[in-house]
Amino acid sequence: MHLPTDSMLLRIFIGESDRADGRPLYETLVLKAREQGLAGATVLRSPMGFGAASRLHTAKILRLSGDLPIIIEIVDEEAKINAFLPILDGMMGGGLVTLEKVRVIHYRHDNVAPKQDAAASS
């Protein structure tokens, strides 16, 4: 798959306890993005954060939260991201969604071992 140099980053902020169809929302979103043929998605779990309600979510032992912040990042060309937005809107309750332009420097599958310099391998 080719990814244009000028692409878009879709960033979705939700809570770990958010659900859709009985599964974690982050899992449902990533699987839907894959189903839609988007270039890639990554889920990041944060140890601390707060959102629109200003409620602090933290992984500290004394203040254990069952709803830690989750960030899903999806990168693809603008048209594909825009086509995904109505699907995303139908799946989300609360949360934050942002879009930004990104410059893709490197995007390829690592299916070939890197070439070694002849001088370095001797």
Image (spheres, grey):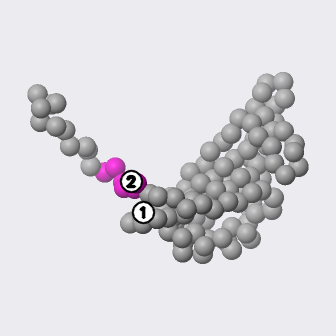
At 76% across and 49% down in the image, what residue appears? 15
CA distance separating discs 2 and 1: 9 Å
Q: Looking at this view, is 31 or 59 the one in front?
A: 59
N-terminal-most mark, 2 or 1:
1
Residue of label 2: 106
Is 81 situated above or below 94? below
Q: Is residue 5 magenta?
A: no
Task: Specify the quadrant of the image occupied by residue 60.
Answer: top right
Q: Nearer the viewer, residue 67 or 79?
A: 79
**Is any part of residue 17 visible from this angle?**
yes
What is the secondary structure assignment of the residue under circle 1?
Answer: loop
Residue at screen point 84% across, 24% down: 62
Please determine whether, in this image, residue 34 is positioned above or below residue 113: below
Q: Position of residue 121 (x, y in %)?
A: 15, 31
Report x, y in % for residue 79.
54, 75
Tag 1 residue = 5
Residue 57 at x, y percent in the picture: 81, 38
Image location (x, y in percent) of residue 115: 20, 43
Q: Is residue 109 magenta?
A: yes
Q: Which residues are magenta?
A: 105-111
- Mark 1 Cα-neighbour bin, 10 Å: few <14, some 14–19, many ≥20: some
User: Within the image, what quadrant is residue 49 found in?
Assistant: top right
